[in-house]
Image (cartoon, rainbow, N blue to C red):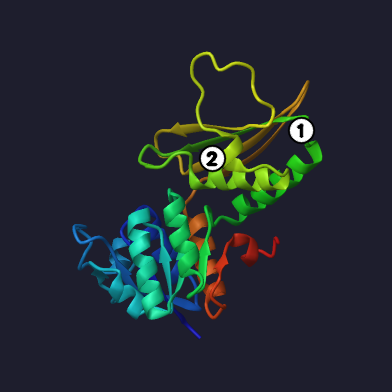
Amino acid sequence: MTVEVGIVGAAGRMGQMLIQAVEQREDARVSAAAEHPKSEAVGRDAGSVAGLNPLGVKIANDAASVFKNSQVVIDFTLPEATVYNLQQAVETGTALVIGTTGFDAAGKARIEEAARKVPIVFAPNFSVGVNLMFKVAAEVAQVLEENFDIEIIEAHHRNKVDAPSGTAIGLGDAIAEAIGRSLPEVAIYGREGHTGARDRQTIGFSTIRGGDIVGDHTALFAGEGERIEITHRASSRMTFASGAVRAALWVLGKEPKLYDMRDILNFR
């Protein structure tokens, strides 16, 4: 069976990679694609936009048509666009994979609400390597207990609009959960001026933006006389796209629920 996969945000960096990743598989094809109405890509062939041969799929100016013509949709857009897409998923009963980051509490609540009606995979990062990093960092944190200070350093390209990255926050969540802390209560997202001595319970975040960095993440555990660093560096967005397509094929036919990459990789 060939799975019909829809792509929203089709002309963006990740959208183009997603189109390529779908078309690399023999068990899936791009069935529909969309961009925001002002995009120059609207009306063009999705394959041509992604640097492939034409696919016979024109990029629409509204995501509604994508959900009507797909079995599962992959969404790497912006939070406000994803909220609209959630409504379309519920109305059409279409499975959804969300790679968008930067949601506030209300946005995350909307995702949880929609997942009671359609199956949704929502993850801060779809790279298999990154999700393995989450697992390893959580296990390391449990072994080290409170004897090490925890810092998370992330770097991305100059055009990334949210900070810290969703992946960095996901890494912090995994570590905090493993050692019985609540990330919103212990996260430190910036330091300036006279900050005083470091609180041993906190988890610090440092953000770098520049050039064309695809995505670097490090979990640093600093103790007395030694430190441990767990690092993942992405050199191509294809690793994220391939993971998202894997998630899309996995979630098809699942019961309505909110899933993440731990479910797909059997890390739970």
Residue type of the residue flagged with mark 1: Glu
* SS at badge 2: strand
**Furthest-top residue in this view:** 194
Q: Is residue 67 left or right of residue 136?
A: left
Q: Residues within 10 Å of mark 2 (few under 14, many from 20)?
A: some
Q: Quarter holding the C terminus? A: bottom right
Q: Quadrant of residue 69?
A: bottom left
- Count the numbered circles shown: 2
Q: Nearer the viewer, residue 2 or 76?
A: 76
The residue carrying mark 2 is 216
Q: Quadrant of residue 179?
A: top right
Above or below for 171 versus 148? below
Expressed as whole percent of the image width and height from the top left, the position of residue 143 reads 81, 41
Q: Nearer the viewer, residue 265 or 102?
A: 102
Residue type of the residue flagged with mark 2: Asp
Label number found at residue 146 = 1
Label number found at residue 204 = none
Expressed as whole percent of the image width and height from the top left, the position of residue 254 reads 57, 78
Please name which of the two marks, 2 or 1, marks the residue nearer to the observer: 1
Q: Residue at x 47, y 32 (%)?
A: 208
Expressed as whole percent of the image width and height from the top left, the position of residue 108 reads 47, 56
Residue 30 in view: no
* SS at badge 1: loop
Q: Residue at x 54, y 81 (%)?
A: 253
